[in-house]
Amino acid sequence: MKWINFLDINSASFPQKIAVIDQRTNRSYTYSDLSDISNGWAVYLERSGIKKGDRIAILASNRFEHLSLMFAAARLGAILIPLNFRLSVGEINSILKRVQVKILFSEGILVHQFTGKYVDFNCFDITKINELSMQHVDLSLRFEATAAELEDDILMQFTSGSTGEPKGVLMHGKMLRTNQIETCNHWKLTSDDITMVETPFFHTGGYNVLCLPLLYLGGTVILAEKFDIQNVLQTISGNRVSVYFGVPTMFQMMATNENFDSYDLSSIRFFVSGGAACPVDLIERYQEKNLPFKQGFGLTEVGPNCFLLGAKDSLRKVGSIGRPMSHSKVQVKNSRGELVEVGETGELMISGDHLCRGYFNASDKFQDACDGKYFKTGDLVQFDDEGFFFVVGRIKDMYISGGENVYPGEVEKQLLTIDGIEDAVVVSKESSKWGEVGHAYLQIGRDVETDFSVEGIREKLFDKLSRYKLPQSVQCLSEFPLLANGKINRAQLKEMANRN
């Protein structure tokens, strides 16, 4: 079986249905267009010397070519690498050399930064692809012998590298297909659904949360160059978007926008939130407009859709990532390697057909990250007697205060129960007395008149948390620094706390 088969089936079944709308060019592509263009690019790449297993890269913000080139690579058996355009030229070049890229598709000034300097690969200006297509790609030529089987690698995405050199995660066809099918089934997606993708394609959420699952079903995907509050609201209203993925920070920014209540968002069947738990008041704000939330959870190595918290449980089990989806095999082990019981803390481990192949040219690092067939996520979790899971922190974020383990996620969960606190992050701060103590960063709602001093916070949490877990210092910020994937940059916040 070929992973790309679904595209050919959709092209034959409903050729004139809109598959992709690219907001950058204001152009729509049918399923027939998507199949033909990716087919033409497969012919072109093959004639350019690209063979099975070769790596091609794209360095660009969200645009149609991320999809057409990925499908072309899948026909060839090549591997597409979407690069983080927010990295420096030196960082990007280091990655390109490590993976031995044969062709780089870039855009605008980025092309000139590489052309002439780095001669190990060809570099094309992606903004001239239409011109290039007309000159070199004959869409009437059919690329018949698709090379990539389900077991073959199709996509390589890099981990964020926040704690070391980014690792190239190899994603095979079975991994992508499993994510597509199980996301569609568990989230009850349909071919009538329309989504908007703003998450950058160098992040697993760009391809795998809703984009590829909906293209598998025959739905419609709207590509936005970047997250823009006004554009989100206009697109949901004007294009009748029915499902939408974002991180809590994005939903918070939308909800506090002055135009939030003036847009018709009635087409939304549900929002998908990932990356962190949504605060109760934020969920309630959306529910007032009859806009339900589902919570997802995953990571690059196993895909983003491993757990699901349904809309009906979003308030009853607030802070939970939900239950494991049926394709996700889950274990939770403590530091002694023992399976934990209800209410105990341990590391989340995940296995299944959605586990990646490994890390490119770093099999030893991938083996170190596994416990048999299970991938060690680095997330510390607890689960309750109903099987709902709660992330209480990362192993690397856990700190020891006076000899006791403190999990930041547990403290953050309680901070979010205080009226007026919209978001909270707890990091460790060095202490001569206790070794480490907690420093809490808070985002406060508008026009809130409450005591958010450290004394006031500790008093409010005194009967909810053990004394050693209570933050020793508090700081309010108007916004939190973010990583490229939209998650909060905890490393930067920790650095800030220890400078003060």
Image (cartoon, rainbow, N blue to C red):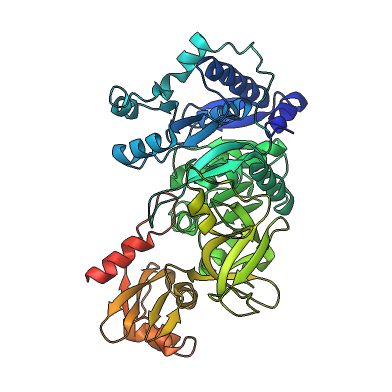
Extreme residue toward the right, this view = 13
Count all numbered tags in the image, as a single digit: 0
Indicate the position of residue 288 as horizontal and vertical percent values: 59, 63
Indicate the position of residue 293 as horizontal and vertical percent values: 61, 59
Indicate the position of residue 190 as horizontal and vertical percent values: 73, 43
State the residue at coordinates (70%, 35%).
218
State the residue at coordinates (33%, 79%).
436
Q: Nearer the viewer, residue 273 or 324?
A: 324
Q: Nearer the viewer, residue 257 or 382?
A: 382
Is 113 above or below relative to 211? Answer: above
Q: The C terminus is located in which quarter? A: bottom left
Indicate the position of residue 47 as horizontal and vertical percent values: 54, 14
Whether residue 199 appears in this view of the structure is no
- Relative to 137, 174 lies left or right: right
Is 259 above or below relative to 16? Answer: below
Extreme residue toward the front, this view = 364
Quadrant of the rendered image containing residue 226: top left
Extreme residue toward the left, this view = 500
Is 40 above or below relative to 244? Answer: above
Q: Nearer the viewer, residue 441 or 483?
A: 483
Whether residue 370 appears in this view of the structure is yes
Is 477 above or below relative to 3? Answer: below
Q: The N terminus is located in which quarter? A: top right
Q: Nearer the viewer, residue 391 or 226?
A: 391
State the residue at coordinates (65%, 79%).
341
State the residue at coordinates (38%, 34%).
97
